[in-house]
Amino acid sequence: MGSLVDLVRAEMMLVYADLFRRKSVIAVYLAWPYMTTAFILMIGYAAGSPQAFAERVGVEAPLFMVVGSYLLFSTMAVVDDIMWRPIYDESSGTLPYIVSSPTKAAVHYISMPIPRFLFALVLGAAALLPLLIVYRGIEGVLLGAVVVLLSVASAIVFVPLATALGLGLYTLGGESWRAIGFLRPLLLMLMGVYYPRWLMSFPLYVVSSLLPPAHCVEVVQRVVTGLAEARAVTVSLSLALALAVVYGPGMLRASRAWELKKLREGVKT
C-alpha cells in the first residue's frame, strides 16, 4: 500500500507540475470539448437539421455533443497515458528504472490514472457547468455532478482492459506505436460517446458491450436525454463493474509478462 501511495504522489508531481508549467495547456483542455463540439456541429448542420437530431436522440445537439466530448477527453486522458507510457518511458530513458524497481508493473499502472481522475473532476466542473446551466438552469448543476462522476467511473473501469491490451501488444510485438495507433481510436469509437449505443446496429451494440466504459457512457447519455430508468442504470453500471473485474486477471498477466520480457531482454538506454 505504501508503494502505491508513493507512486500516486510521484504521478501527481509529474502531471500537475507539467500542467502548471504550461498554463496554456489548461486553457486548451477547458476549451477542448467546445472546440470538438463546434467542429462536429458544423459538419452535422451541413448534413441535417438540429431538429431531426433532437427528435431522434431526445436532447439538443450542442448539449449532447459537449457532454460526449468531455466523456471522450476524460477517458482518453487516462487511456492514452496507459497505452503510450511504455513508449514514452523508453524514449525518455526512464524505462530501465521502472523495470528494475521492486514495485510490480501492475501497481505502477494502477497508480497512473489517479491524478488524471482528480483533474477530470476539476475540468468537468469548469468546462461543463456553464453550458449545462444555460440549458437546464439550476438542475444543470446536479446534472453536471452526475456526468463528471460517471466520467471518472468510465475511466476507472477502463483501466484493466486498457492495461491488458496495451501491455499485451507490447509483449507480443515490442514497443510499437502502430498497433496502439490503430486500436485506440477503435476503442474510443465503440464507446459511443457521439452516437448512442441504443441506436447502434445489433452487431456493433454487442461488440461495444464488451467495453466497460461503454456502459457508463450509456448511463450518462440516458441521464442527459431523460431516459434514465433505475433498472437500466443499475444494470449498466453493474455490467461495467463486472467487466472490469473480469479483465482484472488479464491486466495482471499482461503486466507480468511484459515485465518478465523486459527483464530477460533488457531495455534500451
Image (cartoon, helix red, strand yellow):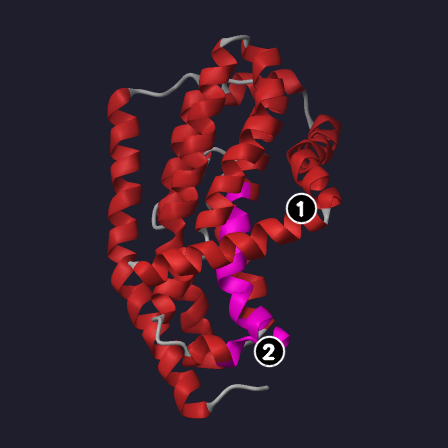
Counting from the top left corner in percent of width and height, residue 144 is at 49, 23
Amino acid at circle 2? Gly
Kind of element beneath mark 1: helix
Question: What secondary structure do most residues of the magenta stretch adopt?
Answer: helix
| Number of dots carrying numbers | 2
Q: Is residue 198 visible?
A: no
Counting from the top left corner in percent of width and height, residue 182 is at 56, 63
**At 48% from the left edge and 48% from the top edge, which residue is drawn?**
115
**At 30% from the left edge and 36% from the top edge, which residue is drawn?**
237
Q: Which mark is residue 93?
A: 2
Q: Does residue 27 appear to the left or right of 12 in the view shown?
A: right
Say few, some or many: other residues with alpha carbon within 10 Å of mark 1 (under 14 / 14 to 19 / 20 or more). few
Q: Which residue is mark 1?
A: 20
Q: Is residue 190 above or below residue 107?
A: above
**Mark 2 to mark 1 CA distance (whole Å):** 23 Å
**At 46% from the left edge and 28% from the top edge, which residue is drawn?**
147
Q: Is residue 16 above or below residue 121?
A: below
